Amino acid sequence: MASIKILLINLIGLFLLFAPSELIAQTYADHSKVAQLDSIFSDWDSESTPGCAVGVSQEGRPLVMRAYGMADLENPVPNTSSTIFEAGSVSKQFVSATMILLALEGEISLEDDVREIIPELTDYGHTITWRHLLNHTSGLRDWGSVTSISGWGRSNRTHNHDHVLDIMSRQTRLNFPPGERYSYSNSGYNLMAIAIERITGETFSDFSQKNIFGPLGMTSTQWRDDYTRIVKGRSSAYSGRAGDEEYTINRPIENVHGNGGLLTTVGDLLTWSHAIQSNYFGKEFHRELITQGILGSGRTIAYASAVRVDEDHGYRQVTHTGATSGYRAYLSIYPETDLAVALLCNVTGASPGGLGSAVSGIFLEERDGGETQPEKGTVRRSDEQLKEWTGIWSDPRNYRATEISWEDGELKLNGNTTLYPISGSEVRVGNSDTLYRFVDQGSGDLHIQVIREGYEEEILNPENPADEFSDSWTRFEGVYVSSDAETEIRIELQGDQLVAHRRPADTFELEPVYENTFSARGFGLIRFVPDADGGVSQFIYSSGRVYDLRFEKQD
């Protein structure tokens, strides 16, 4: 295949963009902003904690680069602006970029059927396109979430792309028909990394190096396709929160990459952001990268091709966060001001979205006028009418439960977020833009329409409350098996407690959520399906990224 023709740029200028943090901090004129920046990371500015590196640039010129805390607590080694971290899901941008470049070269069309190149994928009777994979509307289950059902998740066993193909080839159902809704799934990005190798005849790592990292001068960037390889200057990663006296090592033990696994620095990420914003790959590339997904209903979602397009501090932003094991990442571009913020951390307790947005706020003029109180509608229901909206509601696609209660004269969502009435049929969720609209289906039967900007519209249906205990739970006992998850679960009633057992020694207490449906902490949601005669022959497993996975009861 002819290599992708990339426009030449002034590499010397790129190399000079990101000097050591100490030099930039000394020459940066607004020292008050540097002080504000330091205060944001004060919890991680210690020789006894992990920490972060952060870089800010504007129009491709660095404003400031700083680092906090330790890259390695055992040796010890401090973090610097040139420390290499893992970028979590920010890594996805380099998969989407490659797929877009291949499409612009005419090697593929983003509207092609994925199975033309990945025939191992199950034929679900629906066409899944590369664009579906790019904006997480394919309906494919997240392979890592499937493996966790068996107890051998991404942090428990080393996986590679052969495992991904094997797991995805065994899935008998989609979460939903392609294009119907948005559900974040790493599977699509691993499948695209595999497809890139099949299309180009090169490893994804080599192709990235020759066509993106090398030409841009991203000299500290590579893929973690072999987690045992020595990478000089790489930080370790840790679990823990600010103030903890002890941290535990939490580094990835997998060779799967594309969904994550990018080893990089904040300087290299700012180089990448400038390439995007300056149309280094061309205007058509830039347009494709930020084209938001459109659902079958015609609704536009916030997610584009490995970036979200939304607002922050009153400005349009193109952004993504990342989290893999103990690493955290954030990269955001504000096109109106050509500001870019890159953040990389090596501890779970560092919130990338919150920290990254706080950094951006220092360098952006605030536009949104600060926090406002939720709108109060002129049409108000009485307290007794509002109480009619209380109860348990579930999403019919994944059975996830939402509880609305009446506490201290207010409607509460899941016990903590206030629902503010804004009309006779709508409430606003806290200070967000999310609306719950209560729709009468006739005869007083209600369902809830969940309306959120940038997401598909969801429906929540009322559920009958669960019994605290029932003798009828004996019908749930038995051994259940799933070929999709290659897992066996034994359900047993111990006194008045329903318990799930998983080999070799995992036990989960099942807590009733609503009728026939239980939550198992550390496992997921289990919904038993009664037969016509009142018996039970299967249960449905659901979690955040896996819907409707069936376990069949064995004789």
Image: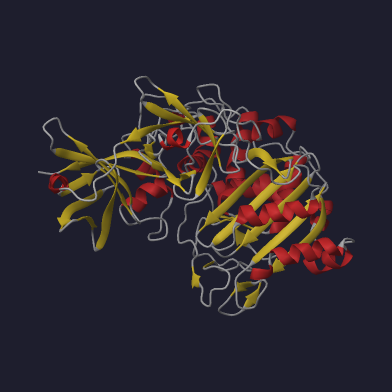
Residue 394 in the image: state x and y as whole percent: 37, 37
**Left or right of 461, for residue 96:** right
Image quarter of residue 96: top right
Quadrant the C terminus occupies: top left
Q: Tell me where residue 529 appears, x and y as whole percent.
A: 22, 37
Q: Looking at the picture, how far across and down is residue 423, in whole percent?
A: 55, 29
Percent of width and height locating residue 159: 41, 54
- Residue 180's place in the image compared with 82, above or below, is above
209 is higher (above) or lower (below) than 29: above
On the question of residue 105 being in view, the answer is no
Left or right: 528 as drawn, with respect to 51: left
Left of 223 or right of it: where is 276?
right
Above or below 10: residue 20: below
The quadrant of the rendering that contains the N terminus is top right
Of all residues shown, which one is farthest toward the bottom? 75
Residue in view at x 67 percent, y 59 percent = 265
- Identify which residue, 282 or 536, lies in the foreground: 536
Q: Is residue 141 above or below residue 163?
A: above
Along the line of sight, which residue is nearer the eye, 119 or 426?
A: 426
The colour scheme used to paint the residues is secondary structure
Foreground pick, 461 / 520: 461
Look at 82% across and 60% down and name the residue there.
33
Would residue 40 be visible to someone looking at this image?
yes
The single residue placed furthest to the top in the displayed view is: 442
Q: How many marks?
A: 0
